[in-house]
Amino acid sequence: MKAAKIGLFFGSDEGNTESISHRIARRLGEDIVDIHDIGEVTQLEFMDYDKFILGIPTWDFGQIQSDWEDFWEDLENIDFSGKQYCIKKGIEIYYNSRGHRFSSSEIRSRLKN
Ligand SMILES: Cc1cc2nc3c(=O)[nH]c(=O)nc-3n(C[C@H](O)[C@H](O)[C@H](O)COP(=O)(O)O)c2cc1C
């Protein structure tokens, strides 16, 4: 477990989310943020972290980006309980810092809707 590190997982068709992901890492510190393209990971990479930033662009009336869509069934099997996360989906941001928590089923529900 890379306890002190943040796992930033992004999907990107046109490069905006990838570019923003690198800007976030530079701002927070590249020594504490690991960047992963969701198109190139397995569930195992998620197990390395207890803090996440998920960059999920939306397309065509709110559909999640294609690599996230492909990863969706794997995401269902990841236990996010007790984890800290920030999700940027389209213009919405979901987070569980400051005591505001979503369960993993709520996250998935919010990502789908
Ligand atoms: C054809 C098209 C459809 C889009 N549909 C949505 C959408 O339904 N909801 C939304 O929030 N953004 C939508 N966007 C904006 C994209 O999410 C935005 O351009 C994003 O930065 C793309 O991320 P990427 O460059 O990392 O692939 C759309 C953009 C395009 C070009």
Image (cartoon, grey):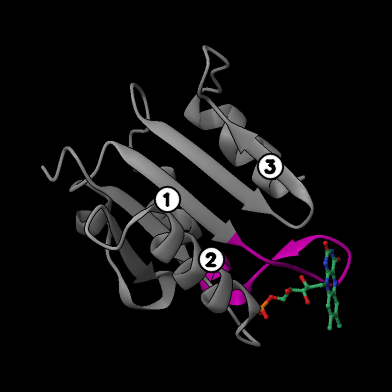
Q: Is mark 1 within 8 Å of ligand 1?
A: no
**Residue receiving disc 3:** 93
**Residue receiving disc 1:** 75
Tell me where residue 25 sits by quadrant: bottom left
Picture quarter with ligand 1:
bottom right
At label 1, counting other C-alpha atoms closer than 10 Å, the crowd grade (few under 14, some 14-19, many 20 or more) is some
Tell me where residue 66 sits by quadrant: bottom right
Residue 97 falls left or right of residue 66: left
Mark positioned earlier in the residue sequence (1 or 2): 2
Q: Is mark 3 within 8 Å of ligand 1?
A: no
**Residue receiving disc 2:** 68
Q: CA distance from mark 1 to mark 2?
A: 9 Å
Residues drawn in magenta: 56-70
Foreground: 31 or 73?
31
- Mark number displayed over residue 105: none
Mark positioned earlier in the residue sequence (2 or 3): 2
Q: Position of residue 108 (x, y in %)?
A: 58, 40
Amino acid type of the residue tagged 3 in the rendering: Ile
**Residue name at image x 44 percent, y 45 percent:** 76
Amino acid type of the residue tagged 2 in the rendering: Trp
Q: Establish if 11 lies above or below 105.
A: below
Mark 1–mark 2 CB contact (< 8 Å):
yes
The mark closer to the camera, 2 or 3, is: 3
User: Which residue of the protein is positioned furthest toward the left in this rendering?
Assistant: 1
Q: Position of residue 26 (x, y in %)?
A: 40, 65
